[in-house]
Amino acid sequence: MSKKIATLITDMFEDSEYTEPAKAYKEAGHEVVTIELEAGKTVQGKQKEATVSIDKGIDEVSSDEFDALFIPGGFSPDQLRVDDRVVAFTKAFMDAKKPVFAICHGPQLLITAKALEGRSATGYKSIKVDMEYAGVTFKDEEVVVCGDQLVTSRTPEDIPAFNRESLKLLNK
């Protein structure tokens, strides 16, 4: 059964942390919808290897329209978390117990949404302390699945495990 995946992304995302999972989701028959502050613009990865056209602006979407949330890493999550609308959108997925996939710096949006307390998760090593302050049991593992809802990974090297576990949740 095809699922609709909201993807929060802006400039300076980590190229492969978007392109590889998005490709895996699409190949499995799922729809990936890119969301930023405004629709129609093009954002660029920090490695300058990937550009992404934004499908929807944050004011055009509701978490109710989607089955899952995907947050690629890089500097994108840190930039997006300053916008209260993006933070509220993120929190709505966690509150509704919908699948959420965050890699590298992706958990920064979940920290700002105050949606990680009491969870096990991982992320890039530079945000470990931030995650612990947010109440996370931090695990230095390639992929951590918490509560049959949250999938987190650390770096581009972890993408195969991240994709595997994300797809498992999407196929439930």
Image: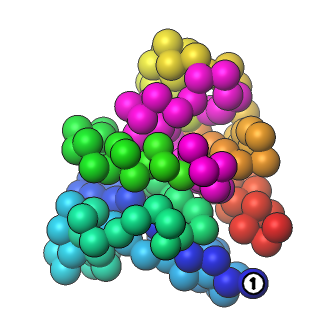
Task: Find residue 68 and report its horizontal and vertical position in percent.
Answer: 58, 63
Q: Give the answer, above or below, for where 41 lies relative to 96.
A: below
Instruction: Classify residue 168 as left or right of residue 156.
Output: right
Q: Which residue is mark 1?
A: 1
Q: Quadrant of the N terminus?
A: bottom right
Place residue 8 in its image quadrant: bottom left
Instruction: Classify residue 168 as left or right of residue 68.
Output: right
Task: Find residue 81 and report its horizontal and vertical position in percent.
Answer: 30, 40
Instruction: Classify residue 74 as left or right of residue 46.
Output: right
Q: Is residue 16 magenta?
A: no
* SS under mark 1: loop
Which segment is the magenta one?
A: 94-122
Q: Give the answer, above or below, for where 157 lies relative to 128.
A: below
Task: Find residue 32 and report its horizontal and vertical position in percent.
Answer: 50, 76
Name the residue at 42% across, 35% down.
Answer: 113
Q: Front-most of 65 and 102?
A: 65
Name the residue at 52% across, 33% down.
Answer: 115
